[in-house]
Image: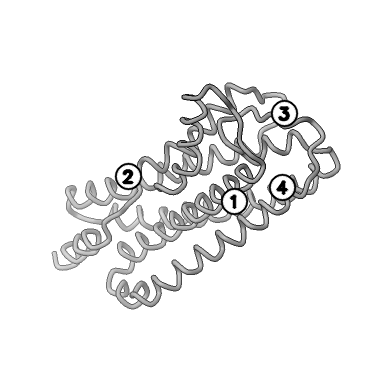
Amino acid sequence: DLGSISVTVPKSMANSLWNTRAISYAGCAAQVFWFLFLLSAEYLLLTIMAYDCYIAICRPLHYGTLLGSRACVKMAAAVWVSGFLYSALHTGNTFSIPLCQGNALEQFFCEVPQILKLSCSDAYLREAGLLVASVCLVFGCFVFIVVSYVQIFTVVLRIPSEQGQHKAFSMCLPHLAVVSLFVSTDMFVYLKPPSISSPAVDLMVAVLYSVVPPVLPGLARADDHLLTGMMWLSILR
């Protein structure tokens, strides 16, 4: 969360203070790489958190077996390796495209769609195809999260205690809200038609998906031990 904000916000604040919009080519490439790396890792972690909540609520007796320390290390390693490969692929492909439309970005940070607007049309299609594939992968993770939460809510609604239901919903719904904001704004940025694109709209949506979710880490962090304890109390009752 801190990393993804630190990649974009400090530079934009410094440019604002010095009344400039300049960034070096290498700096722009580094910003794209780290932003995509941390953003993709964030989304994958949100997906794992949905699975974590599902195990804690729907299969509490198997929580220690399915999500032990070894499993957590493997999932964390998979997240960071996948994020690194995804970011390296996108960054390398984006900055291998020749820029034919100048070098001025209409955004407060180096964003892939804004860079593609400056590229040649034939090269743009190559990266656009990669972006569509990425959106399909993101949508697949979102479907996994939704299916997990359907099963979670099915179990939670069977809890006899209203207080237990309230605790479960208060932990799960904020995480789902952050995921929904994350996915909806990302898909809008990368798939919106050019006819509705404008600097004001692009800026607003960029803030929504790059700044707002990372500053709400507490909303997206479910306390698994409390969830498991709540389920045990429900079972004992």
Label 2, label 3: how far apart the Cα atoms are: 33 Å
Q: Residue furthest front?
A: 18
In depth, the one of 232 and 158 nearer the eye is 232
In depth, the one of 21 and 151 nearer the eye is 21
Q: Nearer the viewer, mark 1 or mark 3?
A: 1
- Give the residue type that dot 3 points to: Pro
Residue under numbered circle 4: 94
First in sequence: mark 2 vs mark 1: 1
Q: Nearer the viewer, mark 2 or mark 4?
A: 4
Residue under numbered circle 3: 194
- The structure residue drawn at horizontal position 36% and vertical position 56%, both measured from the top left corner, is 152
User: Does 146 sit above or below residue 78?
Assistant: above
Label 2, label 4: how far apart the Cα atoms are: 33 Å
Residue under numbered circle 2: 219
Q: Nearer the viewer, mark 4 or mark 3?
A: 4
- The structure residue drawn at horizontal position 57% and vertical position 45%, both measured from the top left corner, is 31
- Give the residue type that dot 1 points to: Phe
- Give the residue type that dot 4 points to: Thr
Left or right: 168 in relation to 215: left
Residue under numbered circle 1: 33
Label 1, label 3: how far apart the Cα atoms are: 25 Å
Image location (x, y in percent) of residue 87: 61, 55
Count neighbours of disc 3 (C-alpha within 10 A) and say few if under 14, some if 14 to 19, many if 20 or more: few
Image location (x, y in percent) of residue 232: 19, 66
